[in-house]
Image (spheres, helix red, strand yellow):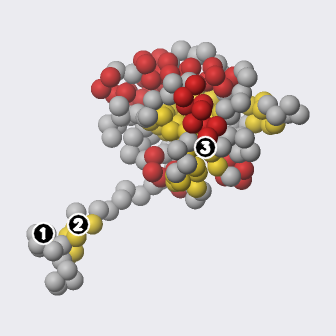
Amino acid sequence: MVFIGCSTGGTSRTRPCCAKELTVATPLSDRSLYQIDSSWTTDAGTTLKLPSLAGRPQVVTMFFAHCEYACPVLVHDMKKVEAALPASLRTNVGFVLISFDSERDTPAALTTYRKNHELPPNWTLIRGAPDDVLELAALLGVKFKKDARGQFAHSNILTLLNAGGEVTHQQVGLNQSPEETVKQIRQLPAP
């Protein structure tokens, strides 16, 4: 840690009375999804950059709020992962739903989804511009295609990111046991 003194402009190991503490961020690895330069909008209508998720593990899936089939099961699978975590670890893990329906999943639609599915505050629901969604989906290995009815055929993948935004585990399929994902979360270094 370095302190910058305002009277001398130099650095020192002691903190002068008018100094400003500078923190040096840990650089992201070249495998970190947090290096993507995109802006997302939360269900609360606020702008979010992916690096703001850094610092703790995240369980992530791509979905769309109007899904009639798989997405409710994916969300249920994420809830099973959360419930299977010890209480002491549960508060240190985030859960992120990323919509690939940029057209219909407005912040209001995501807010309604949060309410209808009783999602707690430690869950983050976001939407992005179509190109940003495509980029992130490619990096997560998620494929999706819109059909004539406005539904999407899509991959069913829960992804575990470590605190630095690197993919460390993927759970593929629906109605999977949370055991392996929970095991992988437990093996991550404490934030």
Q: Are marks 2 and 1 in contact (CB under 8 Å)?
A: yes
In primary-sequence order, the first of circles 3 and 2 is 2
Position above or below: 81 against 111: above
Which residue bears the numbered disc 1? 15
Residue drawn at the location 36% of the way across and 34% of the way down: 92
Which residue bears the numbered disc 3? 107
Residue drawn at the location 64% of the way across and 49% of the way down: 128
- Who is closer to the viewer here, 70 or 157? 70
Helix, strand or loop at label 1? It is loop
Q: Are marks 3 and 2 in contact (CB under 8 Å)?
A: no
Left or right position of 85 against 20: right
**Residues under labels 2 and 1: Cα distance?**
8 Å
For residue 95, say whether it is visible. Answer: yes
Which residue bears the numbered disc 2? 21
Q: Residues within 10 Å of mark 1 (few under 14, many from 20)?
A: some
In primary-sequence order, the first of circles 1 and 3 is 1
The amino acid on which the numbered mark 1 sits, given as a three-letter code, is Arg
User: How many numbered marks appear?
Assistant: 3
Residue drawn at the location 41% of the way across and 43% of the way down: 163
Q: Position of residue 179 (x, y in %)?
A: 47, 17
Helix, strand or loop at label 2? It is strand
Q: Residues within 10 Å of mark 3 (few under 14, many from 20)?
A: some
The amino acid on which the numbered mark 2 sits, given as a three-letter code, is Glu
Q: Are marks 1 and 3 in contact (CB under 8 Å)?
A: no
Residue drawn at the location 69% of the way across and 22% of the way down: 70
- Who is closer to the viewer here, 46 or 80? 46
The amino acid on which the numbered mark 3 sits, given as a three-letter code, is Pro
- Pick the quarter of the image with the C terminus: top left
Helix, strand or loop at label 3? It is helix
Q: Which residue sits furthest bottom?
A: 8
